[in-house]
Image: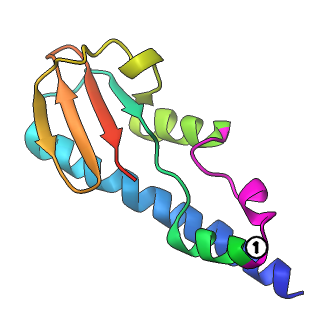
Amino acid sequence: MVFSFSYGDALVDQKRYTDFRVEIPLHDLSVSLPDRDNTPVYMENMIGFGPMTENISKHYPVVKRLVPNDRHYHVYIYLSELFHWGRGRSGGGVPSGAPVVLDSYCHTIRSDGEHILVTFKN
């Protein structure tokens, strides 16, 4: 019974954590690159597990296998359908030398004018 409540809490917290980690770069993109209407946005290094999920998994290790995180396909669908983000090979075509538009504590945004790369920090 305790596990089922912990698992439910972990699911809710992971969704909240994913939304939080995605909303920050969305805000930064709207401020830094306001004219990015049709520019593809790619992700690198993904988001990972939230703090609560990490804590629960100390007692119930199976939680990390059950709770969907950035390694699960539906998170990519969530980000691509809702926010029009893509996942490409090695940054989806953004050159590694592309200028850094913004560097914050949780992500770095690079853009070459045609593509945008958001690199998440863990």
Q: Nearer the viewer, residue 121 or 86?
A: 121
Horizontal relation, residue 68 to residue 26: left or right:
right
The image quarter in which residue 114 lies: top left
Residue 76: image location, x then y, percent:
55, 36
* In the image, residue 65 lies in the stretch drawn in magenta: yes
Task: Please say whether residue 15 is visible from this viewpoint.
Answer: yes
Residue 72: image location, x then y, percent:
66, 41
Give the main secondary structure, helix, strand or loop, of the magenta stretch. loop
Q: Crowding at label 1, few (<14), some or many (≥20) Cα neighbours within 10 Å? A: many
The image quarter in which residue 103 lies: top left
The residue located at (61%, 51%) in the rendering is 69
Determine the secondary structure under disc 1.
helix
Q: Is residue 52 above or below residue 118?
A: below
Give the residue at mark 1.
7
State the extent of the magenta-drawn residues as a range.
59-72
The residue located at (44%, 58%) in the rendering is 19
Q: Is residue 59 above or below residue 28?
A: below
Q: Is residue 67 above or below residue 54?
A: above
Which image quadrant: the N terminus? bottom right
The residue located at (62%, 69%) in the rendering is 53
Residue 52: image location, x then y, percent:
57, 75
Horizontal relation, residue 76 to residue 102: left or right:
right
Horizontal relation, residue 44 to residue 115: left or right:
right
Horizontal relation, residue 110 to residue 63: left or right:
left
Q: Residue furthest front?
A: 58
Q: Nearer the viewer, residue 105 or 70?
A: 105
Residue 116: image location, x then y, percent:
25, 25
Task: Please say whether residue 34 is visible from this viewpoint.
Answer: no
* In the image, residue 63 lies in the stretch drawn in magenta: yes
Q: Nearer the viewer, residue 20 or 70?
A: 70
The image quarter in which residue 30 lies: top left
Q: Amino acid at mark 1?
A: Tyr
